[in-house]
Image (cartoon, grey):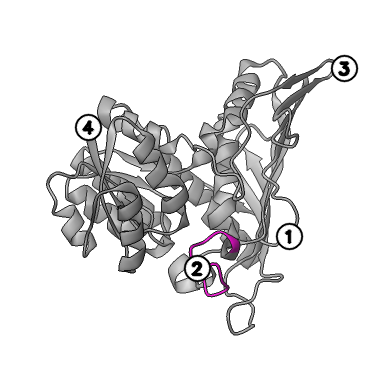
Amino acid sequence: MIKVGIIGCGSITKLRHAPEYSQNSEAEIAGFFDPRTDRAREMADRFGGKVYSSVEEMLEDYTIDAVSVCAANAYHAPITIQALKAGKHVLCEKPMAMSVDECREMIKAADASGKVLMIGHNQRFVPAHIKAREIIQSGEIGNVISFRTTFGHGGPEMWSADKSSNTWFFKKDIANLGVIADLGVHKIDLIRWLTGEEITEVSAFMCTLDKKDQTGKAIDVDDNAICLLRLKSGAIGTMTASWTNYGEEDNSTVVYCTKGVVKICSDKEYPVIVEKINGDKVSYKVGNIQTNDNQTKSGVIDAFIDSVISGKEPAVSGEDGLKAMQVVFACVESAEKGETVRII
């Protein structure tokens, strides 16, 4: 039995981490910490375990094997490194960290400790994405030529625990980046994973178009990002991330190949649709993607616990997290400089 502590008790803990640990027969929640004790108490009352008074108290508990780091972005790296040095396995929410150097320090700490470091990129575990990856990598529809992938919803103030424009997601000193680190990083990781290729070059527009803080001023992080990505093979595509999609959430991807097209999560009844160059069309009824309004099991917690027990490489390693963040920071540089940026 793997005893787990959860650090941070916002919506991601309430709707994903805590329920999924409680449903895993190999895991037991030891307790929670949050700077707001009332939130930690609410989670402990609902899912069991104790309320810790600090991160240090939790990490000093020798009975705890692993922790989930679900705090705000600025705390991901320091808490993760602290936990690894304390001998705990770590599942860290995305975005992995606030700089490439922090990502590397997290990986270094994991290597030194011999403990698992996994990053919570949940899109890899969506049944529709798993099926689409199988189709793409089988060669059935040829080589990837282009792609477009989108993640857009009405904004984190509709999802986060604060439920207001005062959310930490809008504060640069805590969040560092906006929608590209919240939603865009998911799709960057997904494209790497679906195609099996690295992203080598980016050209990006990032801006704040509509979101206001509690004073009515424009927030100081991006609420929209549109990025052109080039893969190592030369294939190119777009990644769009938006907090100003005030209609139905869009979490769709299309991959265009030499022998056909695969459409993913754009049709509710058939989450994977393959259209071939010869006119054949095959539609697959596989599990659809989670949305803010439809929370289903992500698969992240089960994969993390399996890695801790088996000793296998985690499904989303620290290196995976680093590579996704390198693309994110390259997009930021591109948007700031107004030029294409290559990723070494």
Q: Secondary structure at mark 2?
A: loop
Please name the residue that numbered disc 3 is placed on: 279
Pick the quarter of the image with the N terminus. Answer: top left
Tell me which numbered mark, 4 or 3, is placed earlier along the sequence: 4
Q: Residue at x 67, y 67 (%)?
A: 207
Between 190 and 56, the one nearer to me in the picture: 56
Q: Secondary structure at mark 4?
A: loop
- Under mark 2, the amino acid is Asp
- Under mark 1, the amino acid is Tyr
Q: CA distance from mark 1 to mark 4?
A: 43 Å
Q: Quadrant of residue 290?
A: top right
Mark nearer the viewer, 4 or 3: 4
Please name the residue that numbered disc 4 is placed on: 1
Please name the residue that numbered disc 2 is placed on: 162
**Label 1: how many residues lie within 10 Å, few (<14), some (14-19) or many (20+)?**
few
On screen, residue 135 above or below 114: above
